[in-house]
Amino acid sequence: MKSILLHIDHDPALRARLQVALDIARSSNGHITCLQAISYEVFAPGDFYGSAIAAAMPIIKENAENLRAETERTLSHEAVPWDWRLTYGSAPHRLLEYSPLADLVIVGPSDLGERGPSSLVGDLVLKAPVPVLVVPEDVTAFDVSAPMLVAWNGSAEACHALRAALPLLACSCKVTLASVAEPSEKARFDFPMSEGAKYLSRHGVDCEIVEIPRGEARIADTLFSAAQLRECGLMVMGAFGHSRLAEMLLGGVTRQMLTEPQMPILLAH
């Protein structure tokens, strides 16, 4: 993955995803485009004359300039090519605009100042033509040769994620294709795991096929446990198999994964 689009913001996961972007770029001789979107959307009820927005603009701009300077100092010590795109507007819109010529978009799991899954991630996964890598803040490095786990449910989304992750999976020392058994449901796989394994094998990637009993745990916890047991550094999964609204209201697997991600997760829809 040679063209990496990295979201720059003040959220706690910035340092982690910057390091992951650097590690991936080094392994692939890639290039990082740092995208910093500055938004002046200050919601102040009753501020009909824009006085609150006018007062906030210099502070927002100063904070953005300080973040850029700090990040550029870090990048200047790394042997990785990069460029900086400073734009005005909402981050989801600007990242989507730049994503068509990227191989990968890297973001954090939560929006700045918000708790719970990121709406930015949801917008990107559903609309961007490239995979989205979500990096939690406690990640300190990304080893492309580490074991990786692909969460498989036989859906078209899972297939899209598998295909999108192929450049990373090809670097892994061990790939596991894992599904969580659902005894209460009839077989619903459009694409059995064997088809995913065949696809990988055609690209020179061997994988282990594992079916995990559901048990009492949530599917997200079951998959994270399976990945941690195998010392995986990345999980790959299809996102929003149902409509995004249904996932948000009913608590789908995608939402569970993004609420408390325990490792980097590569998502595609």
Image: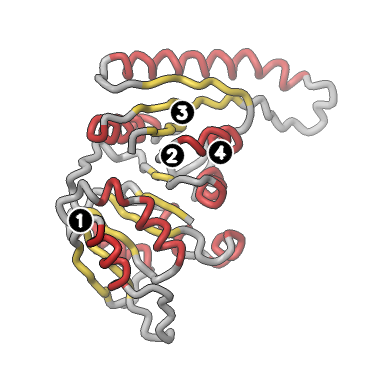
Q: How crowded is mark 2: few (under 14 residues within 10 Å), some or many (20 or more)?
A: many
Task: Please name whichever residue, 184 or 167, is drawn nearer the observer in this view of the structure.
Answer: 167
Q: Residue 8 carries which label?
A: 3
- Give how far apart the Cα atoms at labels 4 and 3 are: 14 Å
Q: How far apart are marks 4 and 1 (CA)?
A: 32 Å
**Residue 260, position as x, y percentages in the image:** 39, 52
Measured in 3D between alpha carbons, the distance from the residue under mark 2 to the one under mark 4, in whole angstroms, is: 9 Å
> Mark 1 and mark 3 in contact (Cβ < 8 Å)?
no
Mark 4 or 3: in front is 4
Comparing labels 1 and 2, the label whose residue is closer to the camera:
1
Answer yes or no: is residue 224 visible. no
Chain-order first, disc 3 or disc 2: 3
Looking at the rendered image, the disc whose residue lies closer to the viewer, 4 or 1, is 1
Give amino acid for label 1.
Gly
Amino acid of disc 2: Val
The quarter in which the N terminus is drawn is top left
* Rendered image quadrant of residue 247: bottom right
Q: Which mark is residue 96?
A: 4
Image marks 4 and 1: residues in contact by CB distance under 8 Å: no
Which circle, 3 or 2, is nearer the viewer? 2
Q: Say which residue appears at 39% left-offset and 71% top-offset.
A: 154
* For residue 101, side relative to residue 191 (left or right): right
Taking the image as shown, residue 124 lies to the left or right of residue 44, namely left
Asked whether the residues under the numbered discs 2 and 4 touch, taking CB atoms below 8 Å apart as contact, a structural biologist would say no
Which circle marks residue 48 in the picture?
none
Upstream in sequence: badge 4 or badge 1? 4
What number is the disc on residue 105?
2
Could you say where residue 106 lies in the image, as x and y percent from the top left?
A: 41, 38
